[in-house]
Image (cartoon, helix red, strand yellow):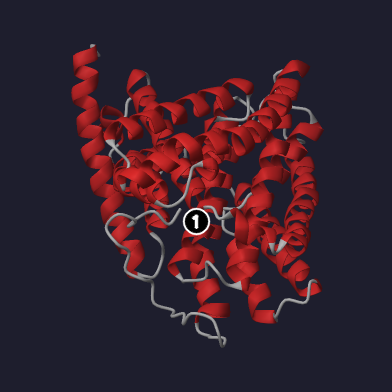
Amino acid sequence: MTQSELAIHFFLQLAIILAVCRLVGLLARKIGQPQVVGEMIAGVLLGPSLFGLLAPHWQQDLFPKGPSMAIIYAASQIGLVLYMFLIGLEFDTDLIRHRVPSAVSISLAGVTTPLVLGCLVALLLVQDEGKFFAGGVKNWQAMLFMGAAIAITAFPMLARIIFERKLSGTSLGTLALAAGATDDAISWCLFALVLAVFKHDPMIAVLAIGGGVFYVLTVLTVGRRLLARHVGQRAERQGSVSSPMLAVILMLLMCAAWFTDFVGIYAIFGAFVLGVAMPRGVVATDVRRSLEPLVTNFLLPLFFVFSGLNTQIGLVNSVGLLLIGLVVLAASVLGKGGACYVAARLNKESVRESLAIGSLMNARGLMELILLNIGLQAGLITPTLFTILVMMAIITTLMATPLFNRFYGRFRKDGENELTTTPPVLAPATEGAAR
């Protein structure tokens, strides 16, 4: 295709992607699931698993391999960076400080147990060389990857559920946010280590760890003060974020994404940390109001579709592969939800709060898909394992809201906001943002 033809084709792809994601997302919300679940499923439906099965020629014509997919991928990465920046804007570090001991113990349980179970599953999978992991992947690399894939939490989705249920200032909400954030940080560090060694260059690991630590410390100390002085104070005086100021913020965001991607810890981390460092008040409110509708309703669905286009359920075409899928699912649920529940109980949390924490921490959602796509693009895993893990991510994400409502949503404690089992109606700006 010429550049003009690619652009015209991209517009058609966008129209169909947005229509299908909206339709399936609305159906998901009808049954009490967040919009993200519908978009994850919509991505699979548009890929070879359904659309490609029913109308393979149309599917290939609409989503041909080559430059067209590269455009979708690039646009989806912009959406991811913007979305993780918005999640960072909503992250309240003050709440986290008050529950550090419990959060650390729950996080460690939610990482170590999945890591052990993931290692055992990986040892089973690497026996079939080249079927699940690419050639050249060492046993310990496969073990760490599976551990990270099972241990990761859908932190953005967890944050949105807590916000929607009005739990942001409660004991449960604070503990779940702290544990989820710590869990994801540890899981991504493990994954970064695997990728660094897989590329046979120790300097990659040094650059990733050193560059990541330097970036986080710089942005959350000096960067935060400079942003407060030159962006926060000016916005407060003006009463809003001006267009030039928004342009500067977006420029800083792109620089943050570039730097963390360059050092090897990926653009989404740079975006999230910059969001955490941004001034609250007028800045956070205006930036969210300006960006959130476009990001959640337009750009982010592209990522789910891109993941779906790489998911081929038909690859899991034997009883043996189905059994492996069930083993991975069981290890994921027991290793994550079960371990976090036990750790919460050992920290003297109530039964219902412990069950609620376990159900929230068990969801994978967007973060799992990001990790899997990076692993697939890097040649670490095969499309077969990618598909198995995507299905695990969808199922555990589907489980989160019903289990949370079952264990916690029907009850009310004195001093807490009332919770209901009916999903709340989101404002237009945040509809579909429950990632």
Where residue 366 sits in the image (x, y, percent)? Answer: 50, 47
Where residue 69 sits in the image (x, y, percent)? Answer: 37, 26
- Figure quadrant of the N terminus: top left
In the picture of the structure, the residue carrying the numbered disc 1 is: 157
Give the answer, above or below, for where 254 lies relative to 108. above
**Amino acid type of the residue tagged 1 in the rendering:** Met
Residue 136 appears anywhere in the view: no
Tell me: 138 left or right of 429. right
Residue 80 appears anywhere in the view: yes
Where residue 357 sits in the image (x, y, percent)? Answer: 63, 68
Tell me what residue is drawn at x 42 percent, y 52 percent.
Answer: 281
Q: Nearer the viewer, residue 58 or 69?
A: 69
Counting the numbered discs, the total is 1
The local secondary structure at tag 1 comes to helix
Tell me what residue is drawn at x 69 percent, y 80 percent.
Answer: 351
Q: Residues within 10 Å of mark 1 (few under 14, many from 20)?
A: many
Residue farthest toward the bottom in the current orientation of the protein: 414
Give the answer, above or below, for where 430 lies relative to 44. below
Where residue 47 sits in the image (x, y, percent)? Answer: 37, 39
Tell me: 190 left or right of 266. right
Tell me: 24 left or right of 364. left
Residue farthest toward the front in the current orientation of the protein: 237
Tell me what residue is drawn at x 41 percent, y 33 percent.
Answer: 249
Q: Nearer the viewer, residue 134 or 298?
A: 298
Q: Residue 362 lies in what quarter of the image?
A: bottom right
Residue farthest toward the top in the current orientation of the protein: 2
